[in-house]
Amino acid sequence: MQAFNHTVFGALVAVTIKEPALAIPIALGSHFVMDAIPHYGNDPKAPRGSKFYNMRVLIDGIASILILVIIVSLKPADPGLIIACALFAVLPDLLWPLALHIKQKGPLWDFFKFHKHIQRESRSGIFVEIGWFVLSALFVVYNVRLG
């Protein structure tokens, strides 16, 4: 999934499960569950490392930050937990650049192999991304407003 979807779902975990000791690991685990669902990726018009791909990653990062700003501006009960859960929900993707600089063995490399193995990317997954985002965002706003 795109980072903005991991971000909003991490926020949803935080507003649903208010106990940090549970919410943060669940937010982290949600990353892998979401990546196993068919989602947008592997666009032959935007291969990894291309200008278009890099622009898409930049826009995704900016969108993730804006989403967090909007959610926190709604004045939730625990904005710190929302930020923490959003960060942990995105964290595995933030580690990808590290894969380019480590030896291809050991537990960290095994983590990257696992993460790559569970990915279910397709161009048509954009519809899954949009639906996931809309539903997650609606539930976050609903839970924040509830209070």
Image: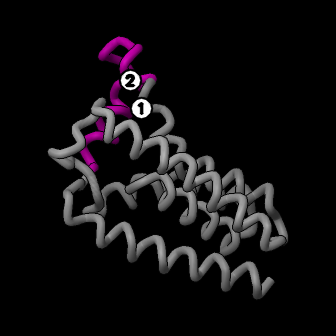
Q: Is residue 89 above or below residue 8?
A: above
Q: Is residue 131 above or below residue 112?
A: below
Q: Quick check: marks 1 and 2 in contact, CB under 8 Å?
A: yes
Q: Which mark is residue 36?
A: none
Q: Quadrant of residue 122?
A: bottom left
Question: Residue at left 37%, top 67%?
Answer: 129
Q: Is residue 40 above or below residue 118?
A: below
SS majority, magenta: helix
Colouring rule applied to residues = one colour
Q: Position of residue 119 (x, y in %)?
A: 27, 50
Q: Position of residue 46 (x, y in %)?
A: 24, 42
Q: Which mark is residue 96?
A: 1
Q: Position of residue 41 (x, y in %)?
A: 26, 51
Question: Residue at left 68%, top 65%?
Answer: 14
Gap in Å between the C-alphas at discs 1 and 2?
5 Å
User: Label 1's element?
Assistant: helix
Q: Residues within 10 Å of mark 2 (few under 14, many from 20)?
A: some
Question: Residue at left 79%, top 67%?
Answer: 73
In screen coordinates, is 147 left or right of 1? Answer: right
Q: Residues within 10 Å of mark 1 (few under 14, many from 20)?
A: few
Depth order, front residue of 111/66: 66
* Three-letter amino acid code of the residue under disc 1: Trp
Image quadrant where one finds the N terminus: bottom left
* Three-letter amino acid code of the residue under disc 2: Ala
Question: Residue at left 48%, top 61%?
Answer: 5
Q: Which residues are magenta?
A: 98-119
**Does the stretch in magenta take in 77?**
no
List the residue tagged with mark 2: 99
Image quadrant where one finds the C terminus: bottom right
**Does the stretch in magenta take in 99?**
yes
User: Label 2's element?
Assistant: helix
Q: Position of residue 140 (x, y in %)?
A: 63, 76
